[in-house]
Amino acid sequence: MLEHGGRLRSAAQRYGIPLGDWMDLSTGINPQAYPVPALAPEVWLRLPEDDDGLEAAAAAYYGSPELLPVAGSQAAIQTLPACFPPGRVITLAPTYAEHPYAWRSHAVQTLEVGRIDAAVRDADTLLLVQPNNPDGQRFPREQLLAWQEELASRGGRLIVDEAFIDAEPADSLVPLAGRPGLVVLRSVGKFFGLAGARVGFVFAEAGLRMQLAERLGPWAVSGPARAVTAAALADRAWQQVARERLVADSRRLAALLDRHGLTGGAGTTLFQWRPSAAAIDIHARLAAQGILTRLFDAPAGLRFGLPGNESEWSRLAAALARL
């Protein structure tokens, strides 16, 4: 079982701090989530239907109709490896650990970014997160497309997880979906703050989407989750305000961490990554104050999500000052 952020109950037990007294900065989820609308009673009574507007809303929001709704991008991460014959898979180190774990029945190699270009020549699958989780590494669009063309020329594929790209949609490869050898994953859990809804989308060629749909079975996404997601994807006004706020808050977080000696690293609009040889100690000292961060040991570092209000910003600043 891989570890993830958000393990508040475990932290509360370990540090003896009541669950309600914690500030969770461990997940990289928008702390000001999309306001879920009231749902019609029949949404709970009927089986999900694929003509309820979700696919249309997703195609308009993401910029492509070549999509398949799934129960969070995690469902696709776990299912995609079975859709391809065993082969050589390369991915970045570090990255979201579920990706290499899901492909463990294949020959998986994790590489530093500088070694990917040479390795692609002999690979069948390249797995990347754009921007990368946890270190915020970004890949130029031209480089991604060059790798995709190289892989596709030999029947291979580029799989890009764009879970943290919503605030910068111009960088997305989704508008190119349908190209041979290109698979793009998206999620409403991070930007929209709807992680509990478990809704994501796979953008890919029709044949691969059919394979995934067959493996995932009917009603992969619940009716209530479909309704909430369709509303969120159609709400352009909320999206614009959220993008502007997240960009400003990410810069604010980066500056706050820098002022308190946590320098270097990078981030996205939803988190900041700071490498540190003292990561274990810093994580523990913040946790002792009821602030949960995401600890990584290889390389040693901490990922900080965004505080959700001014009280939390002040609390984080005070805790960092005590370090």
Image (cartoon, rainbow, N blue to C red):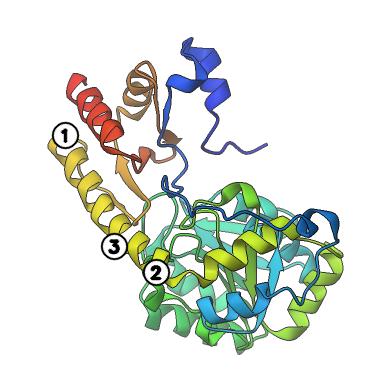
Identify whether 117 is placed above or below 244. below
Please name the residue shown 48% across and 9% down the image. Answer: 16
Please name the residue shown 22% across and 27% down the image. Answer: 320
> Callout 1: 10 Å neighbours few (<14), some, many (20+)?
few
Of badges 2 and 1, the one in the foreground is 2
The span from disc 1 to disc 3 (Cα, nearest Å) is 27 Å
The span from disc 2 to disc 3 (Cα, nearest Å) is 11 Å
* Residue indicated by mark 1: 261
Amino acid at dot 2: Ala
* Residue indicated by mark 3: 244
Secondary element at image label 2: helix
Sequence-wise, which precedes: disc 1 or disc 3? Answer: 3
Location of the N terminus (image quadrant): top right
Sequence-wise, which precedes: disc 2 or disc 1? Answer: 2
Location of the C terminus (image quadrant): top left
Amino acid at dot 1: Gly
Identify whether 234 is placed above or below 7. below
Please name the residue shown 65% across and 83% down the image. Answer: 66
Identify whether 215 is placed above or below 33. below
Please name the residue shown 81% across and 64% down the image. Answer: 48
Q: Which mark is residue 206?
A: none
The answer to whether residue 78 is visible is no
Q: Which mark is residue 237?
A: 2
The answer to whether residue 316 is visible is yes
> Callout 2: 10 Å neighbours few (<14), some, many (20+)?
few
Residue occupying the far top of the picture: 16
Please indicate whether residue 107 sits to the left or right of residue 273 in the image: right
Are the residues tagged 1 and 3 within 8 Å (C-beta)?
Answer: no
Amino acid at dot 3: Glu
Q: Where residue 40 sits in the image (x, y, percent)?
A: 71, 58
The mark tally for this picture is: 3
